[in-house]
Each structure stands twice: as C-alpha cells, then as structure tokens.
Image: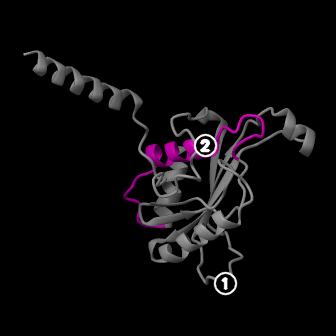
Amino acid sequence: MQRLTILILTFITFTFSEFVFAQPPSVYDKNEELYYYSETNFNNIDTLTYWSYKLELEYKSNDKINNIKPLGLLTFTRTKPIVDSVVQKVHKEPYTPTISFEIYNLADSTICKQVSKQTHLMSSCSPPNVGGDYFVYGNFIFLNRDVCLECSPYSTHKDYCRPVVNYIINSLFDKEIRTIQDLSKQIKNAQ
C-alpha cells in the first residue's frame, strides 16, 4: 500500500509540475539551436500591447547568391521604447526591440536553413542577440537575416523579441494558412 501511495504521489507531482512549469508551444526548434536560444526565456512574454507587427508584401531581398525570392517581410517592433542607460549613452536614443523575418515557400527550406547557419556563424554577438532565426510555420519558412538582433538591451540581456514572436505566431495565426494572402488576412485580423 505504501508503495502504491508513493507511485501515485510521484505521478501527481510530475503531472502537476509539467502543467505548471511547461513552456508554451514553440515555433522555434530549441533543441536544434540550443546555444542561440540559451539566454531566451520563452515563458517571459513582454506586454503584448507594446508590440506591433507589419507584413510587407512588396519586399525585395538583396540576395543575389542563393537565387531565392521572399514572398514578404514580417517585422515585429516594440512600440514603447525600453529605458536603458547604456544604450542611450552610446546611441543617444531609446532602445526599441525589433526583429524581422523574410518569408519563403517550403520549397526553399534547404537554402534558407543554410543561410540561417551562415548568419549564426558570422555573428559576433552573443545570445540572445545572435541573428539568423529560422522556423517553419504552416506552408512558410520565416528567416531572419540579421547577423545581430536588437532584442536585448545591454543592461538586462532579456530577450524581448523571441517570446513575443513565439506567442503571437502560436496564438493568433492559423496553422492552415496556405498562401501569403491568407497570412496577410491573419495578421490584419489579429491586430
């Protein structure tokens, strides 16, 4: 009887801790890119009312080497700057976290993954400001080409961008989006 009680208590404790401490579903593959997301707490989601997102369908990439064409550019920007004395001392302006993703068809996945890895390798930044984010959502690939991101102020190293992107993509967008026009409608409806 004592053994059964211990087993039941262990099961309840494990189930409760999984429920309470579970991370939100992630569009980011944290296992594959563990180092780049090592300083990102995906549970620490910034105030969503401070963020806006914009889809540019007329966006043109400067990539002449890989011969892939994006369908658009999705940019997430914090509308309320963060007060960071170090940033203001160096740049003389408030700190505004921003991250952009070029959007590609799934057929471009191999090239996009290579571009992501090259961007990671070229970055002189440390997590969480290493760029090159890559994830698949619906029928699309989202690729960040920035070598260094503007997601974490110098003083805190808190990643403001990725938890918000992860939350918005998982919560507001429909996984059944098939076309870039469907994605555009989802963004307009979610704002």
Q: Mark 1 falls on what kind of element?
A: loop
Residue 181 image point, x, y percent: 50, 64
Q: Quarter of the image holding residue 171?
A: top left
Residue 31 image point, x, y percent: 45, 53
Residue in the picture at 80% in, 32% down: 83
Q: Is residue 66 magenta?
A: no
Q: Is residue 150 visible to us here?
A: yes
Which color scheme does this rendered protein use? one colour
Residue 72 image point, x, y percent: 60, 67
Q: Quarter of the image holding residue 144?
A: bottom right
| Residue 154 vs residue 174, the one in the foreground | 154
Highlighted magenta segment, given as a residue range: 151-179
Residue 53 image point, x, y percent: 62, 49
Q: Earlier in the sequence, mark 1 or mark 2?
A: 2
Q: Quadrant of the C terminus?
A: top right
In the picture, measured across the screen, residue 84 lies left or right of residue 78, that is right
The residue singled out by tag 2 in the image is: 39
Q: Which residue lies furthest to the top in this view?
A: 2
Q: Mark 2 falls on what kind of element?
A: loop
| Residue 15 vs residue 151, the one in the foreground | 15
Residue in the picture at 51% in, 35% down: 43
Q: Residues within 10 Å of mark 2 (few under 14, many from 20)?
A: some
The residue singled out by tag 1 in the image is: 65
